[in-house]
Image (cartoon, grey):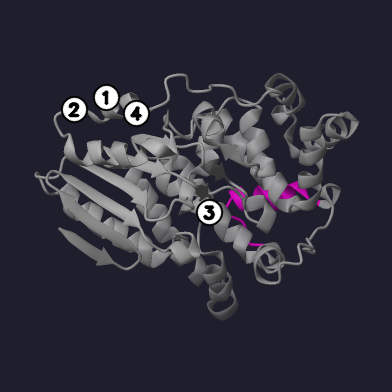
Amino acid sequence: MQDTISAIQCTRHGPVGRITLDRPGNLNAVDRAMAEAIMEVLTQWRDDPAVERVLLDSSSSKAFCAGGDIKALYRSIQEDGPEAAHGNMVVPYQAMQMIADYPKPIITIMDGITMGGGVGLGAHARHRVVTERSVLAMPENLIGLTPDAGGSWLLAEAPRSYGLRFALTGDRMLGAQAVAMGFADHLVPSESLEALKAALLGDIASSEETILRHYAEINQTASLDVSSEAIGKCYDVEDLGPQKGLALLLSRLESSDEVWAKTDLSRLLSVCPFSLHVTWRMQQRLHARQFSRDDAFALETELVLHMISRPDFCEGVRARVIDKDNTPSWSPALLSDVKPEDVERCFNGGELQ
């Protein structure tokens, strides 16, 4: 049985349901319509005793989901204001939480580009697969936002220092790194994906974990990076907070001769200063109180409304996505000019700045 709802394809294979993201022209960017369609199908299958497991994948090997539909969000802010745009963002968050809390096993195949909202759809499931083609990232600071879609929680749960690095820089994780960071469970060669999917859809007698282990690479690389130790020491500054910590971090990166350090320095100097402060504080808060995933989603939802209500977000989207001149004019322009009280106001329900 096959059905097409909005930007997804839905099929039933006996006791297995399959949802395939199908907006290849938009790299499967998730929007309100796609999220509502996913939740509608998952609700039906949750209450159907004949459905025992769900497979969530993409129709394209290029991308699982490249993130939220940023252009649509930008237009919504311009036409209807940030609160209306925020309402459209909340629906995908609800779909992601449904996937995370689903009572039946969901297996996600995060092959190809998986960023932002794509991480939200794929990395909260019970069983998460990546390949050597997978590229995962939470690059929200690049456009004046902050890691959302439950990404802040995943980063906080990752090995210390590395989570902060990926949160601040938005750097990309390859498949093996995603497993090491806790964003995925199994690294499967892309050439084995079709066989894996066929087994998941047809072999209901075997458990999902048994099938996945059969197709996963035997020696999955558990290392984050060849320079892991140096990176860990460099980013071991979270407790200082963003005011002191960012200055020390930039100084360490500037004095290093490592290629990765020069790349990180360039990235940190180009992203939104206010976003860096907010992202840093979010990681601190999640670590300090051991927030649950649902707690993190709630915090992110509040933060995102503040962030898209500031001029930086639309300016970031303009520079990175619309005009593509890559010269955003941030406000404030310097890390040292970000006021701690303005950052804290984002977390404490104060008036938007």
**Region of the chain picked out in magenta, as a range:** 338-353
Q: Position of residue 162 (x, y in %)?
A: 64, 29
- Image point 70% across, 30% down: which residue? 238
Is residue 34 something that shows in the picture? yes
Q: Is residue 130 magenta?
A: no
- Residue type highlighted by circle 3: Glu
Q: For the image shown, how many numbered marks are present on the structure?
A: 4
Picture layout, residue 299 above or below residue 128 = below
Corner quadrant of residue 22: bottom left
Where disc 3 sits, the SS reads: helix
Label 4, label 3: how many angstroms apart (C-alpha)?
40 Å
Is 202 left or right of 113, judged from the image as shown? left
Circle 4 crowding by C-alpha within 10 Å: few under 14, some 14–19, many from 20: some
Q: Which residue is mark 1?
A: 210
Is 82 left or right of 97, judged from the image as shown? right
Circle 1 crowding by C-alpha within 10 Å: few under 14, some 14–19, many from 20: few
Q: Which residue is mark 2?
A: 206
